[in-house]
Amino acid sequence: MNRAEAFHRAKAKNLKTLALYVPIVDRVHGEHHPEFHQVRALAESIITKAKAVRTRLPALDEEFAQLRQVTNNYLVPDDVCESYEAVYQMLSEMDRAYTG
């Protein structure tokens, strides 16, 4: 499977749930985890760009690089809910599929 196929499978699996969870997690945890505001902005950019393409890879190198930095490579904080953890897992899965 090539990178585009892998990414589009991860996209199909995760995009709707990410779009639903990210704003809620930001509202619930953003005060105590202000870095999540940046995660939200990056996730929303990924969602928008991923929806705009069908078979090719969208240009997401910068978004995933920033996400890895902001999230400390998707390290889940100890004091968050399962939805927060799920967001990091979905973003990480999409990142791995994208970067190959």
Image: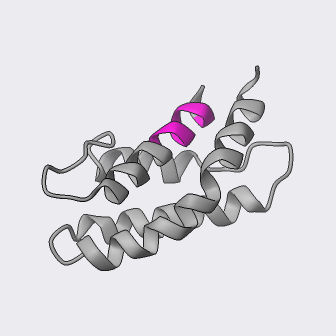
- Residue 3 vs residue 61: left or right? right
Q: Which residue lies at the image location 13% right of the left edge and 49% below the top edge? A: 78
Q: Find residue 49 and report its image quarter.
A: bottom right
Q: Find residue 28 and report its image quarter.
A: bottom left
Tell me, yes or no, whether the highlighted magenta stretch contains residue 95: yes
- Residue 71 vs residue 8: left or right? left
Q: Which residue lies at the image location 32% right of the left edge and 47% below the top edge? A: 69
- Residue 13 vs residue 5: left or right? left
- Residue 96 vs residue 87: left or right? right
Q: Residue furthest top?
A: 1
In depth, the one of 6 and 28 nearer the eye is 28
Quarter of the image with the N terminus in it: top right
Q: Position of residue 73 (x, y in %)?
A: 32, 39
Q: Which residue lies at the image location 35% right of the left edge and 69% below the top edge? A: 25
Main SS of residues in magenta: helix
Q: Which residues are magenta?
A: 92-98
In depth, the one of 87 and 81 nearer the eye is 81
Q: Which residue lies at the image location 26% right of the left edge and 43% below the top edge? A: 72
Q: Position of residue 92 (x, y in %)?
A: 45, 40
Colour setting:
one colour
Q: Position of residue 67 (x, y in %)?
A: 40, 51
Is residue 92 depicted above or below 1 in this figure? below
